Image (spheres, rainbow, N blue to C red):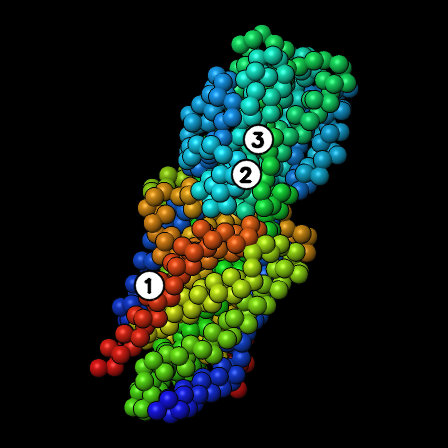
Amino acid sequence: MPTLVSSRLIGLLRKESLQILRDPSSIAIAFVLPVLLLLLFGYGVSLDSKHVKVGIVVEQPGSEARSFVAAFQQSVYFEPHLYPTLQAGRAALRASEVKGILVLPADFAQRLKGDRDAPIQVIVNGVDANSARLLEGYVQGVWTTWLQRELQARQIQVAQPVEPQTRIWFNPELESRNYLVPGLLVVNMTLVGALLTALVFAREWERGTLEALMVTPVTIGEILIGKLLPYFVLGMGGMVLSVLMALFLFGVPMRGSLWVLGICSTLFLLTALGMGLLISIVTRNQFVAGMVAILATFLPAFLLSGFLFDIGSMPVVVQVVTHVVAARYFVTILQSLFLAGDVWSLILPNAAALVLMAGFFLGLSRRLLRKRLE
Amino acid sequence: MFARILALTIKELLALFKDKRSRFIVVIPPLIQLLIFGYAASFDLNHIPYAVYDRDGGYAARDLLARFEGAPSFDLARRIQRQDEIAEVIDTRDCLLVIQVPPRFTADLVSGQTAPVQILIDGRNSNSAQIAQNYVARIVTGFNQDWVFARGLQGMPVSLVTRAWYNPNLESRWFFVSGLVGLLTLVVTMMVTALSVAREREQGTFDQLLVTPLRPVEILIGKSMPGILIGVFEASLVVILAVFWFKVPLMGELAVLYTGILLFVFAAVGVGLMISSLAATLQQALLGAFLFLVPAVILSGFATPIDNMPPAVQMLTLVDPLRYYLVILRSVFLEGAGFGLLAQQMWPLAIIAAVTLAAAGWLFRHRMS
């Protein structure tokens, strides 16, 4: 009786869709949340420091010191502030007015000619270790360029044995937005997927409407599909919107194929929705389901997916833990799809992992739903 | 009045803790998360997988490459024999970078010329790429200095000497673990408060509460207490873990730290109750919690510096309580800052707490119709 089956399913789908339309918060989750987050992230978040405030302590003004300070004033990375004494510079660093100070000692000009004495000293505020290290790199860059120009001007020949020629693939400008935005799509979808479904069954359970539904002739599978499909459509709508924003608003390149993106997004959304359903079925209580959703979605997707922090540098135990975070697989896929292209040897295993996880969440949801009824 | 508030507080705590699962969820997972995230959140690269394509094979090339093999942050993953293997190892992310030594490298160096070395880096994660680039530069500089020195040549003056205050080894774990204290305090407090009034409203028990002799202020205090108690309790546990497990130095005074914690928890409870009283259903409350939580974390400077944000977004961070809390935590932990330096972080928190709590109280009364 295939027609009967489909008419029951259509009925369920209609009921679910009506419920979604009645409480606009689902639609808000699918569309407002991604747009808001992408805007904030795309414009707000960057690891690229520009105009970093640094203090330069010049103990003895001279032509070398002047031209060195000028090199910093011309750099887009720095906003130099001058201090006459080391005390003043240290005080500014302590009060967090500057991120670091460069000290040009009184014998700066002499040390420049020497071989083994460092002519300048750099003190950075190490609290934000990553920024401090990047600052160190930038200072080194300005310093080397200035030194080479200075030596050339004075016709001093120096040996420079090995010269590293660095080429950065996929993201030559090292634009951090290009790697953060694809990762953000994943965080977004994790939230949307789980939020949409986490409360669904718990709510019906609390209100007793699930039992009412069970005594009708619909099957467990139909109930699951009836719940899943409308939210899937909503979630995909949010995903399409996010991808469009990434491409056209933030100018992130898209080097892979759209159909691969479509298939992988489908797999991931099913995983995220499946996780929400499972939370809902296991807790049977909206309050608890909500708390679990807050804990299990945002922070793991934010911190363990490789979206910000390099998984390879984590201790082995933590690396093992990241394998149960679905976002991890989708982040790998998206960063490659956007910036590198269809790298099959990367996409296939990660997509397979998503298939497994989606199957696990949905299959377990189905089993538990049946058991819970007895 | 105090008896009534006490009774309500006890009732609220019972409502939260009578359920075994919510008792568990409020306490245990945040601690497990700190343990996992404390290890996960770090920008330090300590196992950079790299490949070597040595087309020279001379002793200078071997010497340079041996320095990479000896460096603790680098892990040699592959030796490459053909040009087209480079794309393969980078595309699949087997290696973050490939070092290509051209033919005649040793011969050029010995004859006193500058010899290039190609470094190809995967830029998909721009931050890792930049850090790796700096590491490579440091190793090459070391090689150059020794080469020049051994041959008595005139080299570049020795480069910079850098010292880092407060965190001499530049361990980014110190930065992130102290930040995680803030994140987890926020998440737990939001969990407890944002959903609590919404649940009562959905079940209709909030109306019953309103017809009791309790005044709105008393209801507000009663509803705030579980969030405040649990928030401070959880923050204390997390601080203990940070100090004794992760060995993050706690340089400042506990009095300063707890003033910060209390002010922040009040602000977070205020925001949570506001969300809760605006929402008609639990689903709306959950949405509200996330709509606050995620931007609050992103704009707080937890992972990416506020200074890097455009001015308009920087203005927006001024209403983010987590922003101030993170500065307080990190300054007390690592810099040993006292009340004097942190006053400008504390009064905005106090204002946010006052405004949100007042708004929540007002909403309790006026959203009833």
x, y percent for residue B150: 53, 9
Q: CA distance from mark 2 to mark 1?
A: 43 Å
- Is B225 in front, or is B104? B104
Would you say residue B260 is visible in this rendering? no
Residue identified by numbered label 2: B121
Of all chains, the one bearing label 1 is B
Say if A295 sits above or below A97 in the image.
Answer: below
Residue A138 located left or right of residue B368: right
Residue identified by numbered label 3: B118
Q: CA distance from mark 3 to mark 1?
A: 52 Å
Question: Which structural element holds mark 3?
Answer: strand
Of all chains, the one bearing label 2 is B
x, y percent for residue B64: 49, 22
User: What amino acid is labelled 1 in the image?
Assistant: Ile
Please give the name of the residue rendered at 60% of the width and 12% of the height, measured from the top-left corner: B111
Same subunit under labels 2 and 3? yes
Sequence-wise, which precedes: disc 2 or disc 1?
1
Residue identified by numbered label 1: B25
